[in-house]
Amino acid sequence: MKKLLAMVISLTLINSYVSAEGFNYDYIQANAGTTSSTAIDRNLGIGLSKSIHSNIALGVDVNHRHGEWVTNGNQQKQTGTRLELRGIYHRGIGANTDVLVALGYSYEDTKTTNISSYKLEAHAASLGIRQSLTDTIEGEIHYALMNSESNSSIRQVYTSLMFKISTNMSIGAKYMRNITGADFNQTGIIIRREF
């Protein structure tokens, strides 16, 4: 893994290409999904990404999370809102591939039945690749490190696959899994409109 990361970073620094042809970092998207946790069995969100430079984009996502479960015969319910902010540096390493370096911040406000609400802040960094697999299909994969107040270091891998259905519209699927920390995974669908 260290060799792969070193190779990707080296190619990024040496290569003089700009963003891979055809990738658009200006979009709005909606997502819906679920997780392996009963506390978050529904996740609905909306996100926006906007380029501020030829190799830099800023993004914001707002997600509403909801879960219900039974503990010792008592119905439990949890709802929360999560705000995520991120900066993405992208650089072409070929005609069909961008390497991605992202830094992010998230804030979550959650309320659970019979427990006072709690707030959680986290910071994350990721290294990834976005690749055009065909004229209408693109994939993305990231290796991420997240630090929060409650967990000092969680390593994650997440991936997505998008299918272009028109000039500006795509649909796709995403998957995220913790490599370390709690056994947690998340799946979802995405609808994206580029502008």
Image (spheres, rainbow, N blue to C red):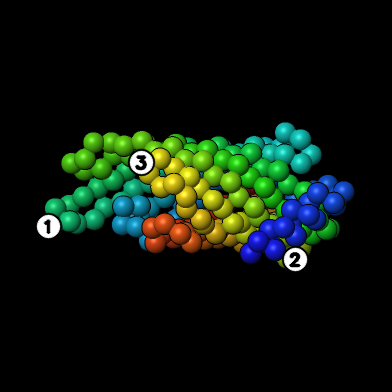
Q: Residue 144 carries which label?
A: none
**Disc number lying in front (2 or 3):** 3
- The circle drawn on residue 80 is 3
Number of marks drawn: 3
Q: Which amino acid does label 1 sit on?
A: Gly
Residue in view at x 17 percent, y 52 percent: 75
Residue 3 at x, y percent in the picture: 70, 63
Q: In which quarter of the image is residue 138?
A: bottom right
Tag 3: residue type?
A: Gly
Could you say which quadrant of the image residue 131 lies in?
bottom right
Q: In this view, does 67 lie above or below 161?
A: above
Q: Is residue 167 shown to the viewer in this render? A: no
Find disc 2 in the rendering and name its residue: 134
- Residue kind at label 2, given as amino acid type: Thr
Residue 184, how many percent across, how many down? 41, 59
Q: What element carries label 3?
A: strand
First in residue order: circle 2 vs circle 3: 3
Residue depth check, mark 1 versus mark 2: number of the one nearer the observer: 1
Q: Can residue 104 be seen in this view?
A: yes
Residue at 52 percent of width and 38 percent of height = 105
Circle 2/circle 3 CB separation < 8 Å: no
Residue 87: image quadrant is top right
Q: Residues within 10 Å of mark 2 (few under 14, many from 20)?
A: few
The N terminus - image quarter = bottom right
* Residue 162 left/right relative to 167: left
